[in-house]
Image (tube, rainbow, N blue to C red):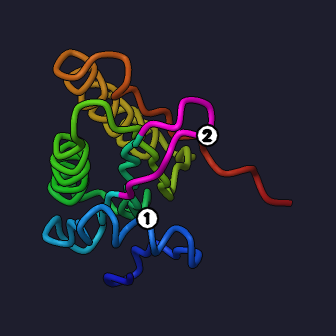
Amino acid sequence: FNRQGVAVVLSPSAHEAWLTAGEERHHDLGARVLALRLAVVDSLTGSRLGVFLVSAQAPSSKDPHTEEWDAFYAALATAISRKQPGDVLVLGASANAAVGTSSTREREAAAREARQEAAVARLVAKYGDDARVELEPPEPSG
């Protein structure tokens, strides 16, 4: 599945798990977030288990427009809220994290981090620790 840069690639067995889950796909979340559900069998217990996959692409960290970041976090929160109780949440995201070199960039980075922490806190408050998502910055190049 592909939606303007956000994608989920499934193996043949994962595709079958998606079909078994009723082909549930959430592609109405904007260009930066896509989610789908798989139905699998727990290898230890033999019981059915739902896996809710979310793929996300954050706005460029150099973009100072906070509305774009707010829209991204709102779409991400909406996707996670669609997870069924008992499903395992798997989130893959490109967070585009970077720290600026000027005081303006530092303030913008701090503001984005605060918005992210607030969004995560709201999700944890609503859904418990299962909703906690930690985004790792990319490794420095060079």
Disc 1 to disc 2, C-alpha distance? 14 Å
- Horizontal and vertical percent for residue 54? 37, 55
Which mark is on residue 43?
2
Q: Which residue is mark 1?
A: 17
Q: Secondary structure at mark 1?
A: helix
N-terminal label among 1 and 2 = 1
Image quarter of the N terminus: bottom left
Q: Main secondary structure of the magenta part?
A: loop
- The residue type indicated by label 1 comes to Ala
Using the rendered view, name the quadrant where residue 31 is placed.
bottom left
Front-most of 32 and 10? Answer: 10
Residue 42 left/right relative to 32: right
- The residue type indicated by label 2 comes to Ser
Q: Which residues are magenta?
A: 38-47
- Horizontal and vertical percent for residue 82? 17, 46
Q: Residue at x 49, y 47 (%)?
A: 41
Q: Residue at x 30, y 61 (%)?
A: 21
Image quarter of the C terminus: bottom right
Callout count: 2
Does 46 lie within the magenta span?
yes
Front-most of 138 and 86? Answer: 86
